[in-house]
Image: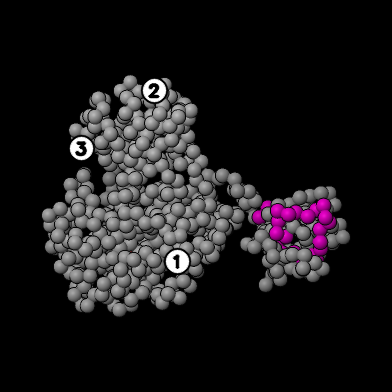
Amino acid sequence: MLKTINCGEIRSTNVSQIISVAGWVHRRRDHGNLIFIDLRDRSGIVQIVFTPEISHSDNEIAESLRNEWVIQVKGKVLSRDDQAINPELSTGEIEIFADEITVLNESFTPPFYVNEESDVDENLRLKFRYVDLRREGMKNALIIRHKVVKYIRDFLDSEDFIEIETPILIKSTPEGARDHVVPSRLYPGTFYALPQSPQQLKQLLMVGGIEKYFQIARCFRDEDSRSDRQPEFTQLDLEMSFVSQEDVLRLTEKLFTQMITEILPEKNIPSPFPRITHKEAMDSYGIDRPDLRFGMKMHDLSDTFKTLDFKVFQNVISSDGIIKGFSVPQAFEFTRKEIDDLTEFVKSRGASGLISIGIDPNAKSISDFEMDQIKSNILRFLDKDHIESTLNITDSSPGDLVFIIAGDVDSTNASLAALRHLMGEKMNLIAPNDLALAFVTDFPLFDWDKEEKKWKASHHAFCLPKDGYTEFLDSDPGKVIAQSYDLICNGLEMASGSIRVHHRDLQEKIFEVLGYSIEDVSERFSQLLDALEYGAPPHGGIAPGIDRLVMVLLGKDSIRDVIAFPKTQSQMDPLFGAPSAIEDDQLRELNIALINED
Ligand code: ASP
């Protein structure tokens, strides 16, 4: 190799050795007759010194070096003088006295600094991803990602799983998004769909007797981007036969606990992972993936306010709405302006307004206070009893501020959940190393789609109803609870899974509730339905998202920061310029004509 040792690995124990290093010029400092180069390779940075003793031509080369040029240096490792030791650098006790330098390649001036983690326009970063990947943050993310995937593979191997690849060119495998499709040349007018997940394939593997399968699987979903979504993303997809929900949750908890303890021991994770039902999550946090790094549970105040002579509340109650609130500790001092801003915030999320009731920190207690120790934007409607009962139900203490929203259940939950999240940040309740992992269980099998006026699968169509709930499939599908579960962390969904239906008639019944016609079912799902009739074992699984996991582990805000070559938020690849038009010949071969809308 062009190097005998990695830059970042040189230590005092190497002093006096003649070594050869190669890498990128991270920084150059010219001190008259001394030139210092920080040389960087993947392992880190080492300081190289060019002194006048080096040959004239080598010195000239050293003078000409610019950031990001690729060089090889041979020289001797020496200890630094005490005052020159750099404790920030793992190689800070030594430096290399250059003997010989070779320029392996020059570089244009990079479009942004590699030697700083400064904010750079994302399009520029993605267009020059090969430069961006040299930056510390990206490099570390890819290393952690590698460690996570390697840990998963080793762990599941030791648990007797086998890794199996499933096809990318397949047929629609619905997970609730649009498909990405690929036209077939040999069968003009027909298309493959890229898998939204290997869901049906892994179920077929269970019918195939594999018993424990996993895959680091690429999934493709054509849906609107968000900061934690990509049109293609990676899941750890796993499936097991002869298991109950408990088995899958235990395995998942063991994997996550051991992996995080090994890879990022500084993180705090709960043991065991708390479990809450979907209903508890919605009631207490207004969302099915609550951030459990802080409290501020929500409480239903409809009963309390039933008797209050306040029209807004009365209207909400009579139209089957809800009045819900939570207490923010020590927020009594919020200014009028702050509360106005929060009101705008919740309005932008569907609430019609925000009510606040605060109790002065000097009040004796929540049941022993003066009315002038209460501040509220509906003070003139309130009396002591209603205030006391609100403070009581919301577990408030003197100094706290209760936020209340009244409206229909969905928008009240959504806006209050967003407000709670914002309060967690604003009140500094988030400890950076906390990973509040938890399981949410007992999801409903179906959600009512108000716009399309039909039942939609809340996870997907293959989840097994809990014992005793199948009878509601006909009478009241909204009541059916599934054996399905999510793993959540810090307000994000990290994984979802379920125990699956393994009998044809039940699976057909679920398709029927979802409104599929018999033709549709046989066209789209016959492979699975037929397989269920050939000795399908009971089975279930889960699929944690790898990108999101690494993002959360590293505390990043965007999954694009943990993917080597992601698409932009608008689903473009600025580096390759994808998507792009294809040649007319190619179109003709595929028997495709473009509709020109102009
Ligand atoms: N296929 C499901 C998904 O992608 C996960 C599962 O049920 O195992 O969300």
Which residue, given by chain and number where applicable, does mark 1 sit on?
255
Q: Earlier in the sequence, mark 2 or mark 3?
A: 3
Residue depicted at 26% across the width and 25% down the height:
310
Q: Which residue is drawn at 50% across and 45% down?
A: 430
Q: Where is residue 31 in the image (x, y as percent from the top left)?
A: 81, 49
Position of residue 180 measured from the top left corner of the image (x, y, whole percent)? 32, 58
Q: In this view, does 16 lie to the left or right of 102?
A: right
Which portion, as a residue range, is magenta? 65-91
Mark 2 neighbour class, 10 Å CA radius: few under 14, some 14 to 19, many 20 or more: some
Mark 2 sits on what residue? Answer: 371
395 versus 170 height, above or below:
above
Q: What residue type is labelled 3?
A: Asp
| Residue of label 3 | 320
Asked if disc 1 is less than 8 Å from ligand 1, the answer is no
Horizontal side of 368 relative to 461 (left or right) equals: right
Q: Of marks 3 and 1, which one's residue comes earlier in the chain?
A: 1
Distance of label 1 from label 2 (alpha carbons): 54 Å
User: Residue 51 shows which numbered tag?
Assistant: none
